[in-house]
Amino acid sequence: MDESASSSLVSINPPETVPYIKCNFLDKDTDLNENPVWNNEIALLLSYWLQQRANHDDIFGSFRSANAHTDSLGEVDVISDAEHIKKLLKVPFNKHSQISMIVHRLGRTILLDEFDVHSHLLRLEKNEWTWFRDFFLDTILRNISVKHFYKKNKTRDELVRKDRLVKFLCQSVELPQLTRSNSNNTTDESQSAEAPSTNNESTTTTAAALLQQIKDLVNASNNLEDDNDENQNGNCTSSPFQRTVNWTFENMKMLIGSDLPIFGDEQHPAVSLRLRDMNKPINVLTGIDCWLDNLMCNVPELAMCYHVDGIVQSYEIIKTEDIPYREGCQFPPGVVRDLATNLLSFLKANATKEGHTYWLFKGPDDDIVKLYDLTSLCETDRDDNPYTLPVATLLYKMAHNMVLKSDYETRLKESGTIRTLLKHCLDMLDPEKFPEYYCAAAYMMSDLFIDDNITERDWTYDENDLTDSESSKDTVR
């Protein structure tokens, strides 16, 4: 087998939640077309999973992750959404795929964000991105029909599949029946009982932890929406994802945001769930998607639930390392590994200018992916680019972290890098529009030129010293 070296360190957000949701494997003949018996907790979880999908359209998603994990800036190769990474790595297996992503470079770190052409460039009511729109209309639409960029309405089959998936995930959550009425009944019974059993106490504790987990997830999502309203430029420090993963794939280090629902039980401590129609064969793209999801989140197994027209038939447990060799979805892991390496090399070799905004693009019929330097190609004032302040802020934070973490000797060695980061930051900012950011960067830049070994006495004078000096001059005379 062609194995790909992969390791990941998963950080759950928020940290106090329990890692995985306890799994309830559905009985055979469970009908996923019917509405399950909802309780308040399941309704909250359903709302959370539906809302999370909108985060993948956030053009500042990588900036939010970077602001929440500033220590990773300059330490990892890529910061992005897991969905964006998977989309790029599936390109060789889907010739008609379309890529549109915004790229930024900060030190050795590449930031990747999805850019929806239809939403930002083709909707007439949108007044932003006019500088980018002119370039797009003059350059891209000469060779590609505009119809490829319009969002297609979902078909009935797609809506049915989504509905079944949501019902499947929610019914797969093993939750104690602790609705509000049940909770009240439990309280009344406990007051009348003299000695509640240890098992009941344990069940209540577990139930409380699971319900709190769901509430924490929903609250985190709601807090992020509030941050988005107040921080449209990506400077908020709320992580837009359920978990953040430090993923090492071969020799590449990535900070990945993931919303993959991870379940578990006694026999399978961590498992991802997939719903599959037995009437439709598994294809290569599905296999790659499942494989990468599990690799990124360090999940050892996949539980595939097969159904026929929404009626559950059976489950199959598949080890993550066996996914590339499953019948119908075989793919060589080495190809995916090589593509990741080549893609990173391509971005680092061409997206070389810090502070510049790049556009990674592939049309539906293109054979290659192209990278455009929008800052150089588009005639625009720097303040018209919505990424100006987010990039400048991260450049300042990178420099600030390097100063704080280093001792005097290390700072001397890295002073050139720190000055470069601050210079790019100052070049991007208008001191009249962003005086606080500009002054902070300028102050740090000036501080670099002061030797830490120089004491206050070395650059100030003492009145007694001055008197002694004048007396000695008089004596000489």
Image (cartoon, grey):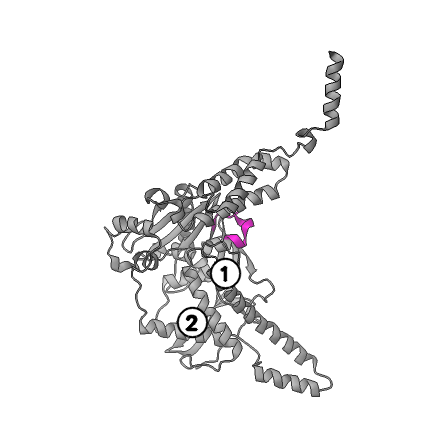
Rendered image: mark on residue 227: 1
Query: Is 78 or 415 nearer to us in this picture?
Result: 415
Q: Quadrant of residue 91?
A: bottom left
The span shown in magenta is: 66-78
Mark 2 surroundings within 10 Å by alpha-carbon count, few (fewer than 14), some (14 through 19), many (20 or more):
some
x and y percent of residue 466 in the render? 72, 24
Q: Is residue 194 visible?
A: yes
* Residue 70 belongs to the span the image colors magenta: yes
Inspect the magenta stretch and tell me whether residue 141 lies in it. Answer: no
Please give the name of the residue rendered at 29% of the width and 50% of the height, measured from the top-left corner.
134
The amino acid type found where label 2 is placed reads Leu
The image quadrant of residue 464 is top right
Residue 198 appears at what percent x and percent y?
A: 70, 79
**Mark 1 residue element:** helix
What kind of element bears circle 2? strand
Q: Residue furthest bottom?
A: 192
Q: Alpha-carbon distance for marks 1 and 2? A: 33 Å
Residue 54 is situated, as x and y percent measured from the top left of the image, at 42, 64
Q: Is residue 6 left or right of residue 285?
A: right
Locate residue 159 relative to residue 242 in the image: left or right: left
Residue 131, percent across and down? 33, 49
Q: Quadrant of the C terminus?
A: top right
* Residue annotated with mark 2: 275
At label 1, the amino acid type is Asp
Mark 1 or mark 2: name the one nearer the start of the chain.
1
- On residue 284, which mark appears? none
Q: Is residue 463 above or below residue 100?
A: above
Q: Nearer the viewer, residue 94 or 465?
A: 465
